[in-house]
Amino acid sequence: MLWALTQLYTFPDSAVVAVYQAALRTLQYQNTAEEPTPGARTIAITVFDGEHTSDAQTVGVGVTVVNDRTPSLTLNDGSTTFATDFEEEGDAIMVVGNLDLTDADSGGLLIDSATVTVSNGQDGSQEQLTATAGVDIGVTYDEDTYTLHLTGPATVQQFKEALATVEYINTANEPSGADVKAIGNDGPAQRTILFVVNDGEFNSADATTDVSMVTVCGNTGACALARLGHGAGCNTRKRARTTCVHLGRSTTAVAKRSHS
């Protein structure tokens, strides 16, 4: 009889030692798990002659995993999209919700890097992304490309925690990109923020946050002129300032009307 792991092999009683020796030389190990647990395996081999069992001889097998799965990033409750508002002259805002990051590769393979990019940035150094660096994660921002770089390598959990801290701010007095209309409400400026995670081999699918700019004005008298219907109206808030869109155009339209 021959034991290999938990498999029992038997041969005819008349089999000679050479037959067992030939069989032992064909032993192979295989693991068909999609994501095997990495680490050492020990295979113990004994031979029994009907009366006595040989001492166990061991073979060590090291199991390593292959990076063949794509990381998965979601920005809010399993969705790859998120939307939020940024108020002109306001504080930085979070650009993710209930973020999650996973990588189906087993064995705790590390994430290499992540990028977060304002794909349609327009206000130069006044428009920025920030994140909190971790023990194994460095954070840098390239204002020329509006790209935040998070560099590892670090664990999936470490990158998840770092990405959950990403914030956006625009310190421009009037954020660029509003959909300006001669009459009626101007459309707010929009920004799209793109997230990509790389595990050293594969990029995650794109995840995006859409940011709508809420324009703010503090001149309530001028905002009152805008309510006449020339341009966007202003919605007075409980705060000292009111919100409006492209106030300058609204005021100009009213002035022209007064000369008619």
Image (cartoon, rainbow, N blue to C red):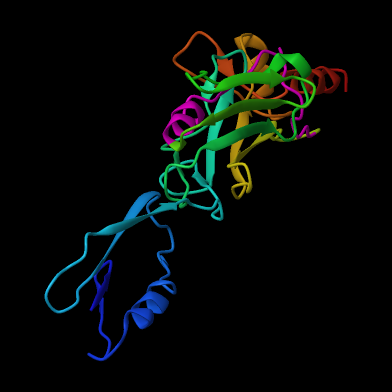
Q: Is residue 25 above or below residue 59?
A: below
Determine whether 202 is above or below 136 in the image. Answer: below
Asked whether residue 40 is drawn in magenta, I would say: no
> Which residue is at 87% across, 18% downward?
259
Note whether residue 188 is visible. Answer: no
Q: Residue at x 71, y 33 (%)?
A: 186
Query: x, y percentage for residue 37?
Result: 37, 52
Residue 114 screen position, x and y as percent:
60, 34
* Quarter occupied by the C terminus: top right
Question: Which quarter shows the N terminus?
Answer: bottom left
**Looking at the image, can residue 37 be seen?**
yes
Placement of 33 over or under 157, stated as above or below: below
Q: Nearer the viewer, residue 157 or 21?
A: 21
112 displayed left or right of 135: right
State the residue at coordinates (19%, 73%). Answer: 48
Q: Nearer the viewer, residue 100 or 103?
A: 103
Q: For the image shown, how many numbered marks are present on the structure?
A: 0
At which x and y percent is residue 246? 73, 23
Q: Nearer the viewer, residue 106 or 84?
A: 106
Name, please, the residue furthest toward the right.
Answer: 260
Indicate left or right for 11 with 110 as reference.
left
Vertical side of 73 occupied by 163: above or below: above
**Residue 160: % across, % down:** 46, 34
Q: What span is colored magenta in the figure?
A: 157-181
